[in-house]
Image: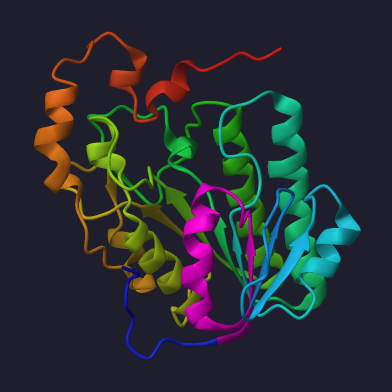
Amino acid sequence: MPAQHPTPLRFERLLLTGAAGGLGRVLRPRLKAYCDTLRVSDIADLGDAGPGEELHRVDLQDKSGVLALLQGVNAVVHLGGISTEQAWEPILQANIVGVYHLYEAARTHGVRRIVYASSNHVTGFYRQDEVLDTEAAPRPDGLYGVSKAFGENLARFYFDRYGIETVALRIGSSFPEPKDRRMLATWLSYDDLERLVVASLTAPVVGYSVIYGMSDNSTAWWDNTKARHIGYRPQDSSDVFRVAVEARQPHLDPNDPATIYQGGAFVRTGPFE
């Protein structure tokens, strides 16, 4: 059941990039409630256009294609790019060159707000016994995390120089339910994901803001107090899954870097040829 928002603000045209990805497929039907036209893009198959949808197959490396993609758009939810640890070249092209093209296109067309899908892997080399606020310095756990830290810095620059507002979502683990004990801290329900994105789109003033994408979990490594101006209030919790998750994973190796650090298995992924 999609999250409900009273009398939601509506946009004339929203852009959702990465609409064929895991979270893009979740948000695509939900975001239509907040706009007259939803423009969706990806390099993968987007299927057929639904009512009020515009489909664009655009590679983020294609500067002119991205420029055309942002024409006539009021705001952007940017999920496009590589979402896992991979070799450097695809990360460079999609997550660094691609996000630059996106912000340049936003500047050219006067788009004033972007919701940028960053990642908890920007801070993955902090320990699991630390609690971070939204001003914690990046400690990426891989090349993917490095690319997302670049995107956050680029977004800050485009706000400081050009006034384009961004909410950078350091998304935790958004799945139907937590898969392991790490996700008891990082889990973000699909309904809370919708709440987070809509709050980021509709808060009156955000400037450049960072917020962690997590539900209201009892175990938490992140503190969103300094992002309360965004108005995100999670309503779900991983706690209802705790007994089942702990039964499936009763023991953790205290010497495993994936147990020690917040990034989990990402801290020991790679290198790639």
Q: Give coordinates of residue 68: x percent, y percent.
A: 85, 68
In the displayed structure, 134 sits above or below 7; it is above
Determine which quarter of the picture holds residue 244. Answer: top left
Is residue 29 part of the magenta span, yes or no? yes
Q: Residue at x 68, y 65 (%)?
A: 48
Residue 86 shows in the view:
yes
Q: Residue at x 26, y 63 (%)?
A: 234
Where, quadrant-wise, is the N terminus in this rendering?
A: bottom left
Q: Give coordinates of residue 141: x percent, y percent.
A: 49, 27
Residue 131 shows in the view:
no
Q: Residue at x 41, y 73 (%)?
A: 199
Query: Quick check: 197 left or right of 271?
Result: left
Where, quadrant-wise, is the C terminus in this rendering?
A: top right
Q: Nearer the viewer, residue 93 or 148?
A: 93
Q: Residue at x 20, y 15 (%)?
A: 252
Q: Nearer the viewer, residue 197 or 165?
A: 197
Determine which quarter of the picture holds residue 177. Answer: top left
Which residue, as the protein is rendered here, is positioned at the far left? Answer: 243
Query: Quick check: 66 left or right of 241?
Result: right
Q: Give coordinates of residue 20: x percent, y percent.
A: 61, 52
In the displayed structure, 172 sits above or below 213; it is above
Which residue, as the protein is rendered here, is positioned at the far bottom? Answer: 7
Which residue, as the protein is rendered here, is positioned at the far front? Answer: 48
- Colour convention: rainbow
The magenta-colored residue range is 11-37
